[in-house]
Amino acid sequence: MLTRDDLTVEDCLEVFEAVRPLKLGHVGFKDLGVDFATLRELNRRIKESGAVSYMELISLSPEECAASAGLAAEIGVDRLLGGAGIEAILEALKGSRVGYYPFVGLPEGHPTRLRGGAEAVARHCREALAEGCPGVDLLAYRAVEAAPLDLVRAARAALGANGRLIVAGSVNSPATVREIAAAGADAFTVGSAVFDGSFSPRAGGLAARLNDVLAATGSVPRRPGEA
């Protein structure tokens, strides 16, 4: 994710061009931090590179999320993550090819924290699948009322074999990548931990830090059908 502190970095276009030679397969950004024209151009460049593009909704009011979802559909984002008000967001995406992965649990504030326990997360996962979503976005390591891995395991069980589970927020080490994979996550997002160096403290530059993230994923067996 071209993000830091839950905002798209202001120089996201320049940063993306700097890391384009890595041929990343998945690149994302938030709906806040830069203007719409910049997000449109960023998404165009990501898709031109052959990567899957993601936008995560940081706004938590249903009205703002529905408006951002409409923008995501307009610029052709591949996958939309997070947000509040699943029905309004799906309505805003109607007719587009955007896959929507809603937050589960009870996110609040900015930077976002997650309230709710394993039972609430599991219930929201089942509701998301019933609405036709291909999976969910879980802020496991932003949880304030439950152990992160308990939430990951609960979400995995509720989603079954076909629902996709993305763990977002505060994934900041290779060990964390391995433990969420073992608990059932299909994918994760990482942004601030790359920019501030905490994911790989000894790496000197951004490209080296991203290579360390890629190396961490290489130690995790892929689930069937995972891209």
Image (spheres, helix red, strand yellow):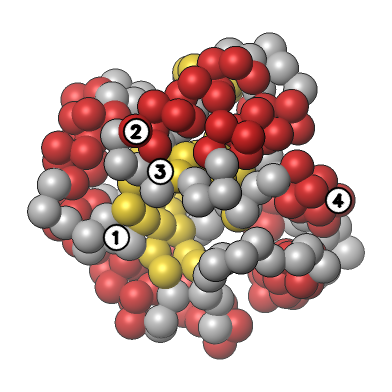
Which SS class for mark 3?
A: strand
Residue 148 percent location from the top left of the image: 73, 29
Q: Are marks 1 and 2 in contact (CB under 8 Å)?
A: no
Of circles 3 and 4, the one toward us is 3
Q: Answer with left or right where residue 212 lies relative to residue 40.
A: right
Residue 33, visible in the rendered structure: no
| Residue underneath mark 4 | 175
Q: Answer with left or right where residue 129 lies relative to residue 16.
A: left
Please give the name of the residue rendered at 76% of the width and 66% of the height, measured from the top-left corner: 221
Which SS class for mark 4?
A: helix
Q: Earlier in the sequence, mark 3 or mark 2?
A: 3
Of circles 2 and 4, the one toward us is 2
- The amino acid on which the numbered mark 3 sits, given as a three-letter code, is Tyr
| Residue underneath mark 1 | 77
CA gap, disc 1 to disc 3? 13 Å
Residue 83 percent location from the top left of the image: 36, 32
| Residue underneath mark 3 | 101
Please give the name of the residue rendered at 86% of the width and 51% of the height, measured from the top-left corner: 175
Q: Earlier in the sequence, mark 1 or mark 2?
A: 1
CA gap, disc 3 to disc 4? 25 Å
CA gap, disc 1 to disc 2? 23 Å
Q: Answer with left or right where residue 113 lies relative to residue 49.
A: right
CA gap, disc 4 to disc 1? 30 Å
Q: Earlier in the sequence, mark 3 or mark 4?
A: 3
- The amino acid on which the numbered mark 1 sits, given as a three-letter code, is Val
Of circles 3 and 2, the one toward us is 2
